[in-house]
Image (cartoon, rainbow, N blue to C red):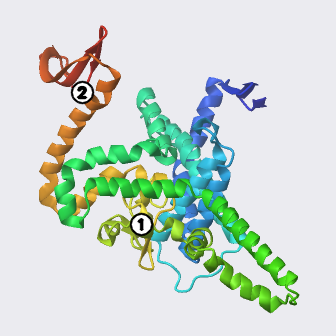
Amino acid sequence: MQLGPITIVRQGKVVMMKNEMTKEQHAEFVTKASADYEPTIKEMQEIGRAIAERVALFDPIDLLMRAFWEHMRSLVGIEAEAEMGQEQNESFALIKFIQTCVVSKTPSSEYKKCEDEDWAFIKQSVAKLFFDSVLRFQIANTAYRTSKGLAHKENDELFFLLVTYWVSLNGERYLNHEEEHLTDLLAPHDETLKRLFGVSGSDIAKAMHKMMVNLVSAPLVFNDFIEFKEKVDAEMGRRLAALESSGEEVTEEKVEALSATVVDDLGLKDKSNEIGGKLFGSDLFDIEKVTGLPATFLEELSLAPGQNSSFFTEGKFSGTPLQRLPTRTHPILKFDKKYYVFHPHLLSDHLYRNIQAVVLRKDPTYAERWNKRQKEVSERLPFEILRPMLPGGVEYRNFQFRGIDRSGAENWIECDGIIIFDGFLIKGGR
């Protein structure tokens, strides 16, 4: 396939592209793309503001629940990360940008019903905004730097990767490792966490893992509903059959009376409330209800509607995914005195640093001790993780050796540690 000077060839699942521009065509392209730099940023900001204005009209919980279930639907049939594509990325971007708009824009005094055309506008606008962030902006930015004589191949490639990861990368670790990871990092701060919030690092790690599993397992609620319905229907069938065999007339009133008692008689009232709250309400996303974590702690990790107005007013890239999204530092949405989480990766990706920031906001004097204990645990953990995998390995920790430093001079260089195993040397930080 030929698209102008770009040749596209597909071999099975592999797609290859070749740029066959002449020098003259490339120079013309750079000129046009460079001129698009400022208009690209301006248009992205306008799209972001338009999304926020539309989002502010509707109940944020309803919007985010709808976005969550659409994201879950996009994952049906996905067995590995390699199978995820544009649909999954866009549906996750929709969740985090809707929440960003909610906390960054003053909400309407009276919420309207979100019609299908409103939803389509929000979805399409968010998809375009994120697409422009990783493609149109990148092209215009590189061309702009080239036209100004600022191009630097290695730096520009690194910037391209950093922006792409910044906008698109989600899920720093597999979620089943989160509890152990967070427990290890927070354990040295147990005394301070208990003093400030009444919970230990282990308590927080277990609770956060429970919330993540709760969200990942959301589709299982449908299985619970089907199983619940089958039990209730079977019992209703038996009771109606008994009623008919007794010769009594089966009236609509009698059927309603039976259905009103059968759930209680089967001992399923609590299960009915649980399924109803998760499937038709917002209980699935209520982190305080799911985990029992204290509101004083959740408050520090949350933002309420309109609480973070700076996202749309400050910075060159304000209102766009190129700006730091408030969900990075405050992954929890506070609404109507409740605390909600709408995606496990929104919660997990920056959780350790977010907790660190919370602790230091509450007790700035703890900063030096936090850094010291963080250093100790980060130097100790690699050995503890690798030791079972390298039985008989010889460890050397915290030593110095003569070598060439970053300035190119011979000097003493610090090493956090090495492991010698089967003739191989595994080295830690310098």
Q: In which quadrant of the rendered view does residue 59 lie? A: bottom right
Residue 317 appearing in the image: no
Asked whether 375 or 29 is in front, the reply is 375
Give the residue at x 27% y 61%. Answer: 358
Q: Can you name the residue that lies furthest to the top here?
A: 423
Asked whether 418 or 31 is in front, the reply is 418
Q: In this rendering, is residue 258 above or below 54? A: below
Mark 1 or 2: in front is: 2
Per the image, the residue denoted by label 1 is 313
Disc nearer the start of the sequence (1/2): 1
Q: CA distance from mark 1 to mark 2?
A: 40 Å
Q: The residue under label 2 is which amino acid type? A: Gly
Give the residue at x 45% y 80%. Answer: 336
Q: Can you name the residue that lies furthest to the front here?
A: 246
Please tell me the numbered disc located at residue 429.
Answer: 2
* Quadrant in the picture for the C terminus: top left
